[in-house]
Image: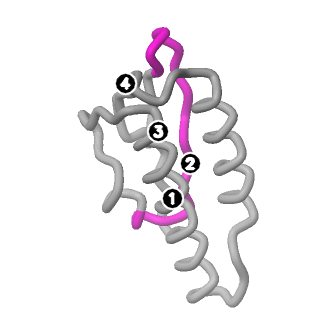
C-alpha cells in the first residue's frame, strides 16, 4: 500500500510529521489545509482508523503503526488550545 506522510505546522511554529499507511488520508488532509487543533485531532483520528481498516481489508490485520500515530497526534494536540490553528504544510515523499 502506498504510504503518505504530511508535515504539519503547529500554532507555536513547531513542525511534526504525520504518517499514514494508506492514501485514504488524502480524503481528509491535503497540503495547504488549515484546521482548528480540535478539528485536526478529530479528522486525523478518523483518517488513521480508515487507513488501518484499509490495511486490514488488504492484508487481514490492522496496521499497529496507525495506533502509534493516533497516540502521537493526541499528544501534539493536547499541547494547544482547541481553537488554535494547525497547517498542513506539505505531503512528504
- Cα distance between the residues tagged 1 and 3: 24 Å
**In x, y percent, where is residue 18?**
54, 42
- Cα distance between the residues tagged 2 and 1: 7 Å
**In x, y percent, where is residue 67?**
71, 58
Q: Secondary structure at mark 1?
A: loop
| Chosen colour scheme | one colour
Q: Badge 3: how crowded within 10 Å, few (<14), some, or many (20+)?
A: some
**In x, y percent, where is residue 7?**
45, 32
Q: Secondary structure at mark 2?
A: strand
Q: Evaluate if marks 2 and 3 touch, with contact meaning CB atoms under 8 Å apart.
A: no
- Cα distance between the residues tagged 3 and 4: 9 Å
- What residue sits 65% from the left and 86% below the top? 59
- Cα distance between the residues tagged 2 and 3: 19 Å
- What residue sits 29% from the left and 32% below the top? 34
Residue 85 marker: 4
The residue range painted magenta reads 10-24
Residue 38 marker: 3
Q: Is residue 88 left or right of residue 46?
A: left
Q: Earlier in the sequence, mark 4 or mark 2?
A: 2
Q: Earlier in the sequence, mark 2 or mark 3?
A: 2
From the image, tell me which residue sits under label 1.
3
Q: Earlier in the sequence, mark 3 or mark 4?
A: 3
Q: Secondary structure at mark 4?
A: strand
- Between residues 36 and 33, which one lies in front from this camera angle? 36
Give the mark toward the camera: 4 or 1.
Answer: 4
From the image, tell me which residue sits under label 2.
19
Amino acid at each position: 500500500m502506498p504510504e503518505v506522510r504530511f508535515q504539519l505546522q503547529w500554532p507555536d511554529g513547531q513542525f511534526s510529521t504525520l504518517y499514514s499507511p494508506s492514501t485514504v488520508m488524502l480524503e481528509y488532509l491535503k497540503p495547504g489545509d488549515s484546521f482548528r487543533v480540535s478539528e485536526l485531532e478529530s479528522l486525523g483520528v478518523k483518517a488513521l482508523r480508515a487507513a488501518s481498516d484499509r490495511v486490514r481489508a488488504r492484508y487481514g490485520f490492522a496496521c499497529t503503526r496507525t495506533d502509534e500515530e493516533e497516540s502521537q497526534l493526541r499528544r501534539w494536540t493536547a499541547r494547544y488550545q482547541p481553537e488554535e490553528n494547525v497547517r498542513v504544510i506539505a505531503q512528504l515523499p
